[in-house]
Amino acid sequence: MLLSFHSYKGGTGKTTFVGNLAVLLSMRGERVCIIDTDVNGPGIHSLFNIKYELTLVDFLQGTCRPSDVVYRYGNNELYIVPSKACEEDIITMFDTPGEARDKMLGLINSIHKDLSIDHFLFDCSPGINRSSLLAMNIADRATIISTIDVQDIRGTYLLSSMADKLGTRAYLLFNRTPYDKRKEIDEVVKDFSKKLGTRLMGSICYDNSVARAWSRKLVMEEEPDCDYCLQLKEIADKLI
Ligand SMILES: Nc1ncnc2c1ncn2[C@@H]1O[C@H](COP(=O)(O)OP(=O)(O)OP(=O)(O)O)[C@@H](O)[C@H]1O
Ligand SMILES: [Mg+2]
């Protein structure tokens, strides 16, 4: 399955969620590959602290093979295609959006052929931009990760209508929800999700274990019983 993760504003918790979800799935014996499509502000390589040379950008620019940009993490079947920061959008590296799509699909098919991946996870850049929409277009399911901040909520409406236009099923997840307001917020977001026609995955509370990790560790590895991980596990069961 191809799963993409988006947000309107930055910092809603996409990279953290994708990284910990991948760890969870790989611990369950699934074969997972994360592709960091956030070419403007990549972060997955930092979260996993991997050493790498060639990246998605090199592959897209045609200077290396698919297998050159895939890095295995740990002893499970978890693979990462990191990105490097560049000022371009993925689409602008090609003459047409169709070419960009074909190149991405070529990468996915090649990795799938070599490694029999069960789930590809795309960590996308925030905002409405063409790299993110390309991943949304390719994905079977697009999860929009929002906070309850009104700036995010308004953008989430836009992103979900984009998913609709592209024919990709949209899923909605709220993150960093204040713990003491959880019940009230859950009622409000249920209504909101219904209006948008998205499938609501639920919400994850603001969690000190994650906040204090500062992306320097994967809580699913080190504190798998923390509240964040317990909530993520419930969401993973709904999403996959
Ligand atoms: N539920 C949570 N509780 C507390 N802190 C969180 C939670 N989820 C994520 N964070 C923290 O928020 C910060 C931003 O998270 P992250 O980098 O995953 O966001 P992002 O959406 O990928 O950002 P960007 O849009 O810039 O790529 C990180 O320091 C992360 O540890
Ligand atoms: Mg990120």
Image (spheres, rainbow, N blue to C red):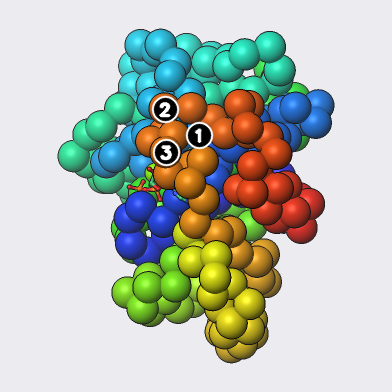
Q: Which residue is drawn at 22% across and 34% down?
A: 86
Percent coordinates x, y for residue 230 in the rendering: 70, 48
Q: Callout 3: few (<14), some (14-19), or many (20+) C-alpha neighbours within 10 Å? A: few
Residue closest to the eye, 138 or 224: 224
Mark 1 Cβ and ligand 2 under 8 Å apart: no
Q: Which residue is drawn at 32% across and 74% down?
A: 151
Q: Work out how far the residue at label 1 is from the one at label 2, CA to CA, in angstroms.
A: 19 Å
Mark 3 Cβ and ligand 1 under 8 Å apart: no
Q: Name the residue under label 3.
A: 212
Percent coordinates x, y for residue 101 in the rendering: 47, 45
Percent coordinates x, y for residue 61 in the rendering: 32, 26
Residue closest to the eye, 44 or 120: 44
Q: Considering only order in the chain, which callout, 3 or 1, is on the residue closer to the N terminus?
A: 1
Q: Mark 2 points at which residue?
A: 216
> Is residue 81 toward the left or the right of residue 84 in the image?
right
Most distant residue in the front direction: 180
Q: Considering only order in the chain, which callout, 2 or 1, is on the residue closer to the N terminus?
A: 1
> Is residue 93 toward the left or the right of residue 142 in the image?
left
Q: Which of marks 2 and 3 is in front?
A: 3
Q: Mark 2 and mark 1 in contact (Cβ < 8 Å)?
A: no
Q: Work out how far the residue at label 2 is from the one at label 3, CA to CA, in angstroms.
A: 9 Å
